[in-house]
Amino acid sequence: MQTLHLRILGRVQGVGFRESMRVEAERLGVTGWVSNRADGSVEAMIQGPGVAMNALLDWVKIGPSMARVERVIARESPAHDPFIHFERRAG
């Protein structure tokens, strides 16, 4: 199982990005969380098997139809307790 920390930059707030990502992550069986940041980006921690993680990363690079993703920064995260589900956090 892999854990990644993501920062998604572009027009990604106010366009349903967090809820759409939650739905997509649950569909793929990826756990973790997603939150808005004060600087206008979106932050996420995602965890799951490689194939599902790659599929979610492909989705994140595009996002929902109203989003305009300019850049995704993905960094491997050190060992982390397993997440139970995928949650949309306030932010």
Image: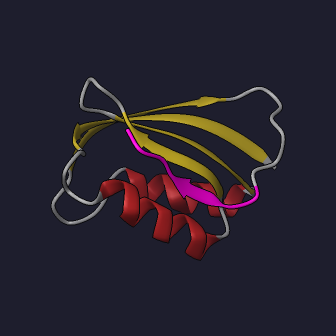
> For the magenta stretch, what is the residue range?
84-91
Residue 30 spot, x, y in % from top left: 65, 61
Above or below: residue 62 compared with residue 80: below
Asked whether 89 falls inside the magenta stretch, the response is yes
Total numbered badges shown on the rendered structure: 0
Q: Residue at x 27, y 60 (%)?
A: 16
Classify the position of the C terminus by image quarter: top left
Q: Residue at x 50, y 36 (%)?
A: 6
In depth, the one of 25 and 39 nearer the eye is 39
Residue 3 spot, x, y in % from top left: 71, 41
Residue 33 spot, x, y in % from top left: 56, 48
Above or below: residue 50 compared with residue 36: below
Above or below: residue 53 compared with residue 79: below
In depth, the one of 35 and 60 nearer the eye is 35
In the displayed orientation, state which residue is furthest to the bottom: 27
Task: Assign the magenta stretch its main secondary structure.
Answer: loop
The quarter of the picture where residue 19 lies is bottom left
Asked whether 90 falls inside the magenta stretch, the response is yes
Q: As drawn, is 53 to the left or to the right of 9?
A: right
Q: As drawn, is 78 to the left or to the right of 68?
A: right
